[in-house]
Image (cartoon, grey):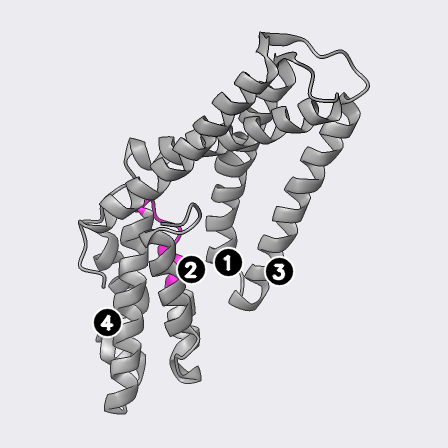
Amino acid sequence: MSLFYNNYKRLVQENNDAYSEIPIKSYKVLDNMFKYLETFEVSLFELEVIKKDLIGLAKEADREGVTFVDKLGVPEKEFCDSLVKDGIRPSHLEHAIPVARTIAVVMFLCYTFFWLWQGMPAEYGVSVFVVEMGLAAWLFDCAMLRRLERKRKAYSFAGADKKKKTFYDLLMGLIIFLIIILELPGNIEFIIRGDGRVIFFILFMLSIAALFGNIYYWDKRSEEYDWR
């Protein structure tokens, strides 16, 4: 089991691979449908299942020698609306688990950075800044980037999406790095103080548990669908 790979990511990768094989004549229609579907509040796994079905229809249309639009039988927007009409909305866990993962991992990385920077002192602690970084990373990732990503995919061309996503990822990393550098000269106020190695180990185990919890959630969620 990989810490960074689960059934959701596996399905996303399969869709991306299959999507790249779609004939040019069907690509644009399918691309617009994907962008439109991503504006709906539908469970992420279900969204990928819908994409897989649409890719299958596009390939079937190509084999039959008909256009993808003719294969749909109705306008693309109407077809998309029918697909998400009874779709499963994201559960509270779908929102909560990535939050826990992001906060745990960022706090562990920030704590480790400061602890190593100061020579791994025997007595150390979790500072206010470390907690703030965990919360800030979650807010930036979930409250801003994910919403912007949905809107961006709804109104932009697929060729520009990867470049923009890379730009936002780099921007987020730069902001976090600058904040850390600016905070280094200041005093560190600890919320929790104790043995530095014990705190390191606890935060490490929490981040690993959060990563595995994320994998377990998506793998269990995948069992609700016939996606293989």
Pick the front one: 85 or 194: 194
**Residue under the image location 42 percent in, 67 percent down:** 16
Instruction: Return the mark for residue 18.
Output: none
Instruction: Return the mark for residue 35.
Output: 2
Q: CA distance from mark 3 to mark 4?
A: 33 Å
**Three-letter code, disc 2:** Lys
Discs 2, 4 touching: Cβ within 8 Å: no
Q: Is residue 108 above or below residue 174?
A: above
**Three-letter code, disc 1:** Tyr
- The x, y position of residue 189, in whole percent, is 67, 8
**Mark before the other along the chain sequence, 2 or 1:** 2
**Mark before the other along the chain sequence, 2 or 4:** 2
Discs 2, 1 touching: Cβ within 8 Å: yes
**Mark before the other along the chain sequence, 3 or 2:** 2
Q: CA distance from mark 3 to mark 2?
A: 16 Å
Residue at mark 4:
74
Extreme residue in the bottom direction: 65
Residue 66 visible somewhere in the drawing: no
Q: Quadrant of the C terminus?
A: bottom left
Q: Nearer the viewer, mark 3 or mark 4?
A: 3
Q: Nearer the viewer, mark 1 or mark 4?
A: 1
Q: For residue 151: magenta?
A: no
Q: CA distance from mark 1 to mark 4?
A: 22 Å
- Magenta-colored span: 34-43
Q: For mark 2, does the 10 Å Cα neighbourhood hold few (<14), some (14 to 19), or many (20 or more) residues?
A: some
- The x, y position of residue 210, in whole percent, is 41, 33
Side (left or right) of 152 relative to 116: left
Q: Is residue 29 above or below residue 136?
A: below
Q: Secondary structure at mark 4?
A: loop
Residue at mark 1:
155
